[in-house]
Amino acid sequence: MAGYVRREYPEWSWSFSRQQLLAGCPRRYYYNYYGSHNGWERGAPKEAALAYRLKKLSNLYLVLGDALHKSAYRMVERIREGRPLPEADVVEEEIRRQLRRVWKSSRDELELFIRRPNRVDMLQEFYYQMEIREDTLAKINGRIKQVSVGLAASDVWAELTAPDAEIVASEQFDTFPIDGTPVYAVPDLLYRTGDNVWKIVDWKTGEEVEDNRDQVALYALYVQNKHGVSASRISARLEYLSLKTSQQLTFSTEDLQKVEEGAKASMEEMRRLLLDPERNVPRAKEAFALTEQRGLCPWCNFYELCREELELSVS
C-alpha cells in the first residue's frame, strides 16, 4: 500500500465521536481504537483480526445517515459547478440505491466479508442474523422520504447560491491541535457569507439530542482555531431533516473556551487508560470495563468478542 507506514500502536488523537464511544462503553472503545489495530494484516492475531472485521460492520440507520451525507455532498458539488440542484425524488432514489446496494452485499457476501472485511459492506443485522422487523423497515422507508424532502427544501441552498457566498469545506476531514493532540473535526458543510459570517451546517437524520449541540460547538472551535475566526462571526445550523426542524446556534468566546476545556478533560480520561501515553500503548483489555447497560450489548458491533464474558457475568 503506497504511503503505508506500519505502527505497533495507533496514533494518538481525539474526536467528539471518540469521547462518545468511551462514555458509552470503555470495552467498545478499546476494540475500536486499540484491539482492532493492525487486524487487517495477514497473519494478525485472531482477536485483532476479528475486532477489525467487527469494526467494519454498519447498521441500517448508519447506512441511511451515510447515504444522506453523500447526497448532500453531491448537492454542494453541483453548486460549485453551477449546475441545478436535484428534486426531492431524485435525492430519494440516490439514497435508496445506496441502501439497496448495502442490503444486497450484506445478504449475498458474508463469506467474502469474513475474508476481506475492508472490501465488502456488511450490515450488523445480517452478520448477527438478527430479525429485521417490518416496523423497522417501515420506519427506515419513511425516514428516507422525509430526509430527502428536507434536504432538497433546505434554506441552506439559497444562501450557498448567493453571488458573494464562499464554500470553504464539505465533508472534509481535518484536524486542529489542542495541547499538541490532533483533534478531528469534520463539519458536514462550512461556508462564508458575504457579510463574513462563517456558517456550519450539520445534517441529521434522527432525533434532537444534546450531544449534537456539543458536536457543532467543537466544529466552531475548529473554525476559530484553524481559520482565525472570532467566535462572534461563527454560527451553526443543526438540520433535523426527518423532523423538518432546525436549530441556529451562536457562540461566545467563553462557550468555546468551555469546549476546549471539556476536550482536555476527556483527553486526560483517555490517557489514564494508557500504559505509555507517549506511544499510545493501552492498558490490558480488562482495564476497559464493559458497559453497565448490558441490554444494549447485542446491538454492538463487538458483541461476538464480548459474548462469552457477558454470559459468564450473568451465570
Image: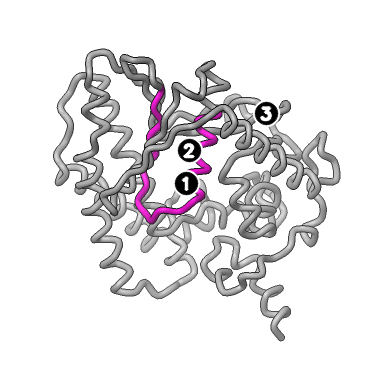
Q: Secondary structure at mark 3?
A: strand
User: Where is the C terminus found, in terms of image quarters?
Assistant: bottom right
Residue 204 is inside the magenta segment: yes
Q: Are marks 1 and 3 in contact (CB under 8 Å)?
A: no
Q: Residues within 10 Å of mark 2 (few under 14, many from 20)?
A: many
* Side of 85 relative to 103 (left or right): left
Q: Are marks 1 and 2 in contact (CB under 8 Å)?
A: yes
Question: Which residue is label 3 attached to?
Answer: 178
Question: Which residue is label 2 attached to?
Answer: 216
Q: Residue furthest bottom?
A: 315
For image coordinates 44% across by 21% down, the residue present is: 233
Q: Amino acid at mark 3?
A: Ile
Instruction: Report the magenta residues as a range.
Output: 198-221
Residue 258 is inside the magenta segment: no
Q: Earlier in the sequence, mark 3 or mark 2?
A: 3
Q: Quadrant of residue 169?
A: top left
* Side of 298 relative to 48 (left or right): left
Whole-number angstrom distance, CA of label 1 to CA of label 2: 6 Å
